[in-house]
Image (cartoon, rainbow, N blue to C red):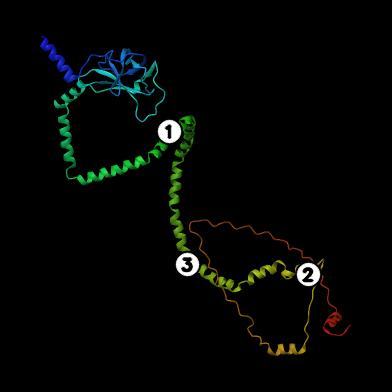
Amino acid sequence: MRRVIALAVLICATLTSCRLPGGAPTGPSYRVMVEFADVLDLVPQAAVKVNDVTVGSVTDISLRGWTAVVTLAVDDSVRLPANATATVDQTSLLGEKFVALAIPAGQPAGDNLTDGSVIPLSRTGRGVEVEEVLSALGLLLSGGGLAQLKTINQQLTKAFAGREDAVKTTLQQLDTFLAGLDEQKAQIAQAIDALDRFSAHLAQERATLATAVDALAPGLTVLAQQRSDLTAALTALSQLSTVGTSVINQSRANTEASLKSLGPILDQLAQAGDDLPKSLDFLLSFPFPPGSTAAVTGNQVRMHATLDLDGAAILGNLLTAPAPSSGGSQPPVPLPPFPQLPPLPGLPSPPPLPPLPTVPPLPLPSVGVPSPSPSGVLCQLLPVGC
């Protein structure tokens, strides 16, 4: 009997490294409450470790609803941040359970845990049980999943046979697409936020939208009643192109003749050059030249004339002047008659225009021009005194 007990103790110490719970350091300590969704077979007096070093023990395990609350006694010399995590682990494959406290990686440390601090359920967890691993392995080995995996593998092999290049290209395009989505993640999130704001605005304006939709009903009713008239109008409008084509074809020759008759008129206007605008400028101050307004004083016009009565010069001009042509000036180029356009087919003749009103003639003020006396002219021509 003693040999059996000794053999059992040896096997427990060698294979499982099992030991009795407890062994927590004595001395001052502070209490920490930890919330767990599952504590497995954790028992009071189990060890509390930090980096595999025992720093306390479990003093109490209670149930609060569906959450287990474990009270820990941690040595007063151990300082842990307030955002520390807690997990239920075991010393070996078949060893005892203990609570492992750890500092979260990548998070800034805040205040320290103090007496009465609580580690919430969001920062706790547990390790995988040996029973769970063996159960999953037994389910896999008993044919629970191997047959399905074999079928899936065979079907994938048949589907991809001879399509390796297409599958490779598809995977590359999918990789490019996912990379593009990842690059535009911020824009997509912004678009979703904008859509959310737009939906919220539509929800606020629901009554207004309902009123607008209800107001559309009378208009839709009128359109439904006038459907036949609108259809007839659209049908008649489709014939407009036919009528327009007919009018253009019938008036083509006359239009070309009218354009050709404009040629001589445009030529004469081009030959006139600057004479036409100068004539219009003179017309504004007729019968006086444009620069004569400065010579008008009251109802008189100051004029200065110089007469050259040199007989030799007058005789020379008369002898060297060319003989006038019998025809006079060049006869004007006759313009072709303006062609008469045919009336538009199928259209009524327009009513005659009313006669233009007669504009009364503008009264022009009479300007008295003093006649020069013969003695004044002789005084200017003769170098002798008058």
Which of discs 2 and 3 lies nearer the camera? The answer is: 2
Which of discs 1 and 2 lies nearer the camera? The answer is: 1
Residue identifier under label 2: 295
Where is residue 74? Give x, y as percent. Answer: 34, 17
**Residue 286 appears in the picture as rendered:** no
Residue 366, disc: none
Kind of element beneath mark 2 = helix
Residue identifier under label 1: 196
- Residue 101 in which image quadrant: top left
Residue identifier under label 3: 253
Left or right: 357 with respect to 116?
A: right
- Residue 102 in which image quadrant: top left
Residue in the picture at 34% in, 20% down = 121
Around disc 2, counting alpha carbons within 10 Å, would you say few (fewer than 14), some (14 to 19), or many (20 or more)? few
Where is residue 370? Give x, y as percent. Answer: 83, 73
User: Are discs 1 and 2 less than 8 Å apart at CB?
Assistant: no
Around disc 3, counting alpha carbons within 10 Å, would you say few (fewer than 14), some (14 to 19), or many (20 or more)? few
Examine the rendered structure and indicate whether residue 234 appears above or below residue 342.
above
Where is residue 205? Give x, y as percent. Answer: 48, 31
Who comes first in sequence, dot 2 or dot 3? Answer: 3
- For this rendering, which residue is in front, 189 or 82? 82
Quarter the N terminus occupies: top left
Examine the rendered structure and indicate whether residue 65 appears above or below residue 50.
above
| Residue type highlighted by circle 2 | Ala
Examine the rendered structure and indicate whether residue 17 appears above or below residue 316.
above
Left or right: 329 with respect to 35?
A: right
Kind of element beneath mark 1 = helix
Which of discs 3 and 1 lies nearer the camera? The answer is: 1
| Residue type highlighted by circle 3 | Ala
Kind of element beneath mark 3 = helix
